[in-house]
Amino acid sequence: MDPVSGLQRARRVVVKVGSALVAGSGGGAADSAWLAAFAADAARLRARGQQVLVVSSGAVALGRRRLGLKRKALTIPEKQAAAAAGQSGLMRAWEEAFEPHGLAVAQVLLTRDDTEVRRRWLNGRATLETLLDLGVVPIVNENDTVVTEEIRYGDNDRLAARVAQMIGADVLVLLSDIDGLYTADPRRDPAARHLDRVSRLTPEIEAMAGGANAGAGVGTGGMATKLAAARIAQSAGCATVITLGARPSPLLAVEQGERATVIEPGTTPSAAYKAWIAGSLAPGGALIVDAGAAAALCKGKSLLAAGVRRVEGRFGKGDAVIVRDETGVEIGRGLCRYDAADAERICGLKSDAIEATLGYTAGPLIHVDDLALAARTEA
Ligand code: GLU
């Protein structure tokens, strides 16, 4: 991917902003000048019709100042307390930055479970999609106050990659204190070469990340966590752009050809997501559909309750199920929006009768975006 057109054409962009950028190096509140310039840069993308989500660190850095916790090494409970105290200031700073552009922001705090347990993942995704469709800029951070050491991401680079995967983003921008990946640490080795593009994250590339970018001080992520994030993004079909964040308009800078490293996506976000549904999830049951529904699915439609004849097996809301026609041929696999008992109650019903039967509706049984059609060889 060429970073210039990649960023210009992306439908959804996730930008990870680290503590050093948000909190600045001074002793006061957030760096409002940088945030204002960044918001203008992000608003430019929104005005072009692109959706932007920000993953922002800075809660701990701002909170420790607010609480006067001066020691460099804080205990875990102290860090969690600092995060709680700093998160509100962090959001206030983002609100103020986006306000002049008429853009609302929304706080979304996630834990690793929210991005890994499928049902929570689906809920989180639905909320993020709704926010994006409403034109809001979600500001995501880890819910540091409640996570324990064992279950935390700890760095927002990987959290940002998971969020990019969750919303099917095309581009993940990791704003760093260095303008990309080098063959060695350029601050120590004058022979270090900048890499513009990386298509495969080989062990050699991973080794290059050792030590580079280690001097950031305020945040937690170094180049190694950036590459771990890029690996997650790559397998989700999302390109990663690592570039210098300290510039006032880092996204514009990339579009103007300033230095950055692009880690190419392995596939497209939708193909990666469908491959995951088709290959990695054990189906809990099956939906047997009539010929009309089978034909509609093959034409790229969602699976409506009206076309379902029978429900087999036990599965929960959001679980993977197999879709078969009445002769037993597998049409595809998808995530069912109802559990087996509710699916059974509504099968054969028209969509507008679902609410009266169940007391709620979650739309089609399987949305087309959550359906991976079985590969077929044409006769
Ligand atoms: N969630 C942490 C914070 O808001 C930051 C983690 C990181 O720097 O990657 O302070």
Image (cartoon, rainbow, N blue to C red):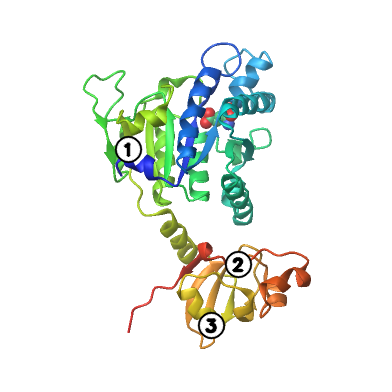
Residue 210 in sight in this render = no
Q: Which residue is mark 2?
A: 336
Q: Is residue 139 above or below residue 234?
A: above
Q: Is residue 106 above or below residue 74?
A: below
10 sits to left or right of 200: right
Q: Which mark is residue 4?
A: 1
Mark nearer the N terminus (1 vs 3): 1
Mark nearer the N terminus (2 vs 1): 1
Q: Which residue is mark 3?
A: 292
Instruction: Tell me which residue sits at (65%, 21%) in the image.
Output: 63
Q: Of all residues shown, which one is farthest toward the bottom?
A: 327
Which quadrant of the frame does ligand 1 lie within? top right
Q: Secondary structure at mark 3?
A: helix
Gap between marks 2 and 3 measured at Cα: 19 Å
Between 88 and 206, the residue placed more toward the observer is: 88
Rendered-image quadrant of the N terminus: top left
Between 105 and 224, the residue placed more toward the observer is: 105
